[in-house]
Image: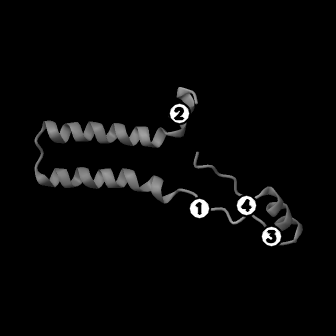
Amino acid sequence: MSVAAFANHNSYAIAAAIVLAVVGFEVVRRRAPWRRLVLFAALAALLTLPPLYVRSGTSIVGSSDAVDRAIAAGRPTLLEVYSDL
């Protein structure tokens, strides 16, 4: 995997890590009161939760033959192609 492909695949995590590093550095440098620490923890949670929420679920069809059978059966079929990789 090239550096560009790695950065593209992990762009959200990289951006979130940079934001947390900058904000965390400022919180520590300024010896922030507990309220700011709570806000920092909330920011960390806010940046961590979206990737966990938007992951795709398991497929209900396991092969291309199963997709072909579903289409041939005359049922309305939605084909969504997505990869977490």
- Cα separation, mark 1 vs mark 2, equals 23 Å
Number of dots carrying numbers: 4
Point 38% across, 52% down: residue:
48
| Contact, mark 4 vs mark 1 (Cβ under 8 Å) | no
Most extreme residue toward the top, as rendered? 3
Label 1 to label 3, Cα distance in Å?
A: 20 Å
Identify which residue is drawn at 18% across, 51% down.
37
Say which amino acid is labelled 3: Pro
Q: Is residue 5 left or right of residue 15?
A: right
Which residue corresponds to mark 2?
Answer: 6
Q: Secondary structure at mark 2?
A: helix
Residue 3 x, y percent position in the rendering? 53, 27
- Residue pointed to by mark 1: 57
Report the amino acid beneath label 1.
Gly
Question: Earlier along the polypeptide chain: callout 1 or callout 2?
Answer: 2
Find residue 34 and report its horizontal and vertical position in percent. 12, 53
> Which is nearer the N-term, disc 2 or disc 3?
2
Give how far across and how far down residue 13 sits, in percent: 43, 42
Q: Position of residue 65 (x, y in %)?
A: 83, 59
Residue highlighted by disc 3: 76
Check disc 4 and report the residue beneath it.
62
Specify the color scheme. one colour
Q: Residue at x 48, y 59 (%)?
A: 53
How many angstroms separate mark 3 from mark 4 (CA)? 18 Å
Kind of residue at disc 4: Gly
Which quadrant holds residue 27?
A: top left
Lower position in the chain sequence, tag 1 or tag 3: 1
Q: Nearer the viewer, residue 66 or 75?
A: 66
- Which amino acid type is marked by label 2? Phe
